[in-house]
Amino acid sequence: MEAFVTEVLRFSSLVANGVPHTVLEDVKLRDYIIPKDSVIFTTTEAIHSDPSYFESPEEFRPERFLTAEGKFNTPREGLFPFGIGKRQCIGESLARMELFIFLTTLAQNFSFSSPPGKKIDISPDEIPIINKPRVEQDIMITIRK
């Protein structure tokens, strides 16, 4: 379940861009100069879909966060759905815990599937700044016995 939650956070990149930052002095980044007082954004979505960090990033694959023994392998690079550094979301541990409990409870008690002849679209709605899930879909939810 931990690998599933982590892949949901990577794949969805709910907040596609980080909070704006201001460059305090001229900075050289590879062949580019970023002038002092420029406003910059991190693009979480671009990093979460970068093949140099994640093989086949367009595929939803929770197993990418599991070892060969089936143990959860905490990602070290390329994943920061709650930001990074001193401005990282202070509620990350609470959010992860709630996601884990909520999704585990749902998975233990219900089965989710698409109705016959229909498909579930997990691509986000096109809304600037956030990746909003598509909610106008038919999903079959049945109680597990």
Image: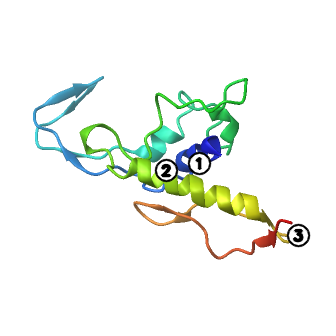
Q: How crowded is mark 3: few (under 14 residues within 10 Å), some or many (20 or more)?
A: few
- In space, the residues marked 2 and 3 are separated at their CA atoms by 34 Å
Q: Name the residue: 53% across, 49% down.
A: 9
Q: State the residue in front, 86 or 24.
A: 86
In this view, the mark in front (2 or 3) = 2
Question: Which colour style is shown?
Answer: rainbow
Left or right, residue 9 beside residue 29:
right
Q: Residue 117 carries which label?
A: 3
Q: Name the residue: 42% across, 55% down.
A: 15
Left or right, residue 130 beside residue 24:
right
Q: In which quarter of the image is the C terminus?
A: bottom right
Amino acid under label 3? Gly
- In space, the residues marked 1 and 2 are separated at their CA atoms by 8 Å
Q: Is mark 2 on a helix, strand or loop?
A: helix
Q: Name the residue: 44% across, 46% down.
A: 81
- In space, the residues marked 3 and 1 are separated at their CA atoms by 28 Å
Q: Is mark 1 on a helix, strand or loop?
A: helix
- Do the numbered discs 1 and 2 sit on residues whose CB atoms are within 8 Å? yes
Q: Name the residue: 47% across, 42% down.
A: 46
Q: Which residue lies furthest to the right in this view?
A: 116
- Whether residue 123 appears in this view of the structure is no
- Do the numbered discs 2 and 3 sit on residues whose CB atoms are within 8 Å? no
- In the figure, 69 relative to 107: above or below? above
In the rendered image, residue 20, in percent from the top left (x then y), is placed at: 25, 50
Q: Which mark is residue 96?
A: 2
Mark before the other along the chain sequence, 2 or 3:
2
Q: Residue 83 carries which label?
A: none
Mark before the other along the chain sequence, 1 or 2:
1
Q: How crowded is mark 1: few (under 14 residues within 10 Å), some or many (20 or more)?
A: some
Left or right, residue 137 beside residue 89:
right
- Whether residue 62 appears in this view of the structure is yes
Q: Which mark is residue 5?
A: 1
